[in-house]
Amino acid sequence: MDMNTDQPLKALKAQILEYIELKTELARLSLVEYVAKIASFIFAAIVGMIIISLVFLSVFIAISFFIGQWLHSYGLGFLISAAIYLLMLWYFVTVGRKKVQNFMIKKIVEQTSKSE
């Protein structure tokens, strides 16, 4: 009678071990997918910010030269542009930082909820 119960228990044990291995592999692959999606979102956001920064830099250099030509002093044109940069920095530090943080949190939560 031991022979009859021994084989099914071995088969059940093998199936349980295989199930645990598969669940572990599924959890690992899900984690890898999750991290890859978040990393790709962050990388795309950084590349986008760099491109936007370069566009703004080019525009502000052009504006600086335009103002400098208009005022017959390139130094004054760049000084006025620097003042505009300082005003933008002041706005970002006082008001915009929290808005940017909330926007990024919202986007990350959206990306993570899409994967589930």
Image: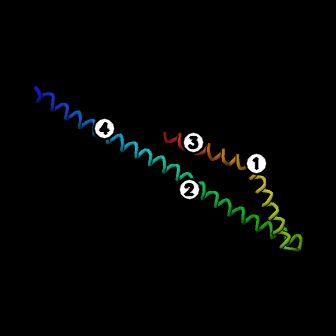
Q: Nearer the viewer, residue 2 or 40?
A: 2
Whether residue 43 is visible here, answered yes or no, is yes
Q: Which percent across, then down, holds residue 110?
A: 57, 42
Instruction: Give the CA distance from mark 1 to mark 3.
Output: 24 Å
Helix or strand or loop: what does disc 1 sit on? helix
Q: Which residue is mark 3?
A: 110
Compared to 8, does 105 lie above or below? below
Q: Which residue is mark 1?
A: 95
Q: Which residue is mark 4?
A: 19
Instruction: Give the CA distance from mark 4 to mark 3.
Output: 31 Å
Among the two numbered marks 4 and 2 on one chain, the one whose residue lies closer to the N terminus: 4
Q: Do the residues under discs 4 and 1 have CB atoms within 8 angstroms? A: no
Among the two numbered marks 4 and 3 on one chain, the one whose residue lies closer to the N terminus: 4
Instruction: Give the CA distance from mark 2 to mark 1.
Output: 25 Å
The type of residue carrying mark 4 is: Tyr
Find the residue positioned furthest to the front.
Answer: 2
